[in-house]
Amino acid sequence: MQLGTIRELWRYPVSSLTGERLDATDLDETGVAGDRQWGLFDAAGTDVAAPESERRWRPVPGLRSRMGGEGPQVSHDGAAWHAVPSAEADRVASEHLDFPVRFRRFGESDAAPRYDRGHLHILTTGSLTRLQALLPAAVIDTRRFRPNILVETDAGDVDFVEQRFIGKWLTVGDAVVEITEPCTRCAFTALGQPDIPFDKDVLHTIAKHGGGGFGVLAKVVTTGRIASGDAVSID
């Protein structure tokens, strides 16, 4: 049964930073290739950025990340980009936050990933439309929720659609994924990002109406290529 089509694809090379929209990507054993492989840490390299819980990290979503030809790059303005890891990238991030920080690859020494529950975060337009109906004045933008895949569902299916398919397998382009659990939400959804204002009501409304989450987490069963416009079907 067809669920919909891929409307948007996203990768976040550095966890907690703004990511990049893609036309196509490979899904490997870790999810979207290159996704959330790096983190931003304090200068001691012990504490990873946690903008949802620590005030000093709140400006982190104002930094941008993308994949360049040689690896991740970061920027504070979208104009000048700096390779990760590098002293220049660390300097730009430190100036943005007003305290010393550095970029580290997860898995190096004690640099553990922030999240390790699912390879992919999947969201539907049905859920976005439902949340917008509950919060007519809010900015309900895909970027606020940081999915890897936004699935465009039938315009009449205005609900938290994806939660009905937990435990099922989806064929997405050339890949197959298993939906494992709801995506539990934290204060990150309320934080301001470039062109997206702070809004505490977003998280409160999800907690009240979302049935335990907003979007779902999934793991890759069969690797493959996926692209915007590909069909998404339930096996």
Image (spheres, grey):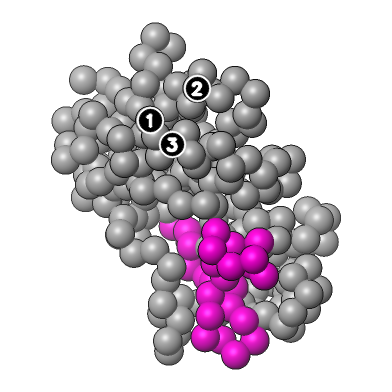
Residue type highlighted by circle 1: His
Secondary element under disc 1, as helix, strand or loop, is helix
Q: Measuring 31% from the left and 31% from the top, which residue is drawn there?
A: 162
Secondary structure that dominates the magenta span: loop
In this view, 225 is above or below 142: below
Residue type highlighted by circle 2: Leu
Question: From mark 1 to mark 3, how far is it between C-alphas?
Answer: 5 Å
* Location of mark 2 (residue): 134
| The quarter of the displayed image where residue 82 is located | bottom right
Q: Position of residue 92 (x, y in %)?
A: 78, 72
| Residue 206: assigned label | 3
Secondary element under disc 2, as helix, strand or loop, is helix
N-terminal of the two: label 2 or label 1?
A: 2
Q: Is residue 19 left or right of residue 115?
A: right
Is disc 1 in contact with disc 3, using a CB cutoff of under 8 Å? yes
Secondary element under disc 3, as helix, strand or loop, is helix
* Location of mark 1 (residue): 209
Question: From mark 2 to mark 1, how far is it between C-alphas?
Answer: 9 Å
* Residue count near mark 2 (Cα–Cα under 10 Å), binned few <14, some 14–19, many ≥20: some
Is disc 2 in contact with disc 1, using a CB cutoff of under 8 Å? yes
Magenta range is 33-58
N-terminal of the two: label 3 or label 2?
A: 2
Q: Measuring 78% from the left and 68% from the top, which residue is drawn there?
A: 96
Image quadrant in which the N terminus is located? top left
Q: Position of residue 208 (x, y in %)?
A: 39, 34
Residue type highlighted by circle 3: Ile
Q: Position of residue 226 (x, y in %)?
A: 40, 40
Q: Is residue 154 visible?
A: no
In this view, 156 is above or below 51: above
Q: Position of residue 168 (x, y in %)?
A: 17, 37
Q: Measuring 78% from the left and 53% from the top, which residue is drawn there?
A: 78
